Amino acid sequence: MNFAMWKKALNVIPEVSKEEWDGLDVISKWLISTRAAVLIMTFISAALAGLFAWRDGSFEFLPWFALVFGLIMAHASNNIFNDYTDFVRGVDKDNYYRTMYGAQPVASGLMTKRQHLTYFVVTGILAMIAGLYLVWQTEFNTTTWILLGLGSFFVLFYTWPLKGLALGEVAVLMVWGPLMIGGGYYVLAGNWNWSVVIASLPYVLGVTTVIFGKHIDKIQIDRSKKIYTLPVVIGEKAARYTIIAMMVLPYIFTGYLIATKFFTPIMLIVLFALPALRESLAPLSKPKPETRPEGFPDGQGGWPLYFAPIGFRNNRAFGSLFMLGLLLDVALRLLPATQNFWR
């Protein structure tokens, strides 16, 4: 087992040669194939759903673990299937961005299409098993079936046709917030809570900046391949300022939720992410440079991507503090001395 590669694949999207690939264990290959470095965003969504349920006295470890495992497997299977779909449609030909910033196993000749689909099927089955367990856990509730169906739909159809119809970014906004956090809360607590959905917005807006940034990075080549992502439709400048808005709004939403006492003031801990926001605003206010700026990481999740890594770093800073803040918020509310005050 190559623990060093596991660690690397959980932090960046590695570039590996065929010789290196053939010497890797199956877990390393799976982590690379699923672009495991980005799965942390899904874990945080599932963790937030669990924390909201815990706050309302509805947390049970086994259903929450099934939720975490199922959502991560669903995201992983989506990433595998996205690569397969782009490959068979010819999108990854002619130095497409996806083959530049990390290994795309099937396009790079590391795996056959059959092997790639096998990874997808096994990962998808694991996600479905977790989903069916939650359906059973909620006594085959109709809403849980709908949530499972919506999740399956986005896994299969995000890359085609949604992304090419300028709906990919909207899909990310829906999946990582209302579906993962709101839906996750539902299967744990047994009721739909719109306040939880609204409270998911500070985090999910940050997730959406990552996909927005990646689509700005690919805007010219996507336009040439007739892939109409939202940045292609609205233009590069409007897309950059949309990202800026989505980075600033989480602080405003969090402040509103504190003012309405949905959150305790401990959530102001997110202000420690402001340095990451400040570092992000300057490059977002200008077009992407023609060449890699000095000191900017090259390859493995870096250049030629530019705005996507900026969005990822900002979201990781805010998201981790948002999750920590919610954990402290829950703990504070559960203290006997403060329970009546925050009701």
Image: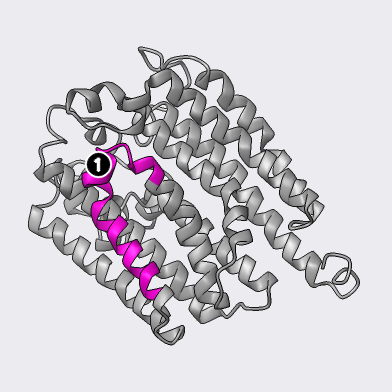
* Residue at 57% in and 80% down: 60
**Camera-side residue of 259 and 155:** 259
Q: How many marks?
A: 1
Which secondary structure lies at badge 1?
loop
Q: Looking at the image, which residue sits at the far right?
A: 337
Quarter of the figure with residue 247: top right
Residue 48: x %, y % from top left: 58, 61
Q: Is residue 99 visible?
A: yes
**Few, some or many residues within 10 Å of mark 1 (<14, 14–19, 20+):** many
Residue 296: x %, y % from top left: 45, 23
* Residue at 24% in and 52% down: 157
As drawn, 1 above or below 137: above
* Residue at 53% in and 57% down: 44
Quarter of the figure with residue 152: bottom left
As drawn, 181 above or below 99: below
Residue 207: x %, y % from top left: 48, 44
Position of the C terminus, as image quadrant, is: bottom right
In this picture, residue 109 sits left or right of residue 146: left
Residue 243: x %, y % from top left: 50, 30
In this picture, residue 104 sits left or right of residue 171: left
**Camera-side residue of 219 and 17:** 219
In this picture, residue 158 sits left or right of residue 249: left
Q: Is residue 303 visible?
A: no
Magenta span: predominant SS is helix
Identify which amino acid the numbered label 1 is placed on: Ala
In this picture, residue 209 sits left or right of residue 103: right
Looking at the rendering, the stretch of residues picked out in magenta corresponds to: 144-170
Task: Kindly identify which residue carries mark 1.
Answer: 103
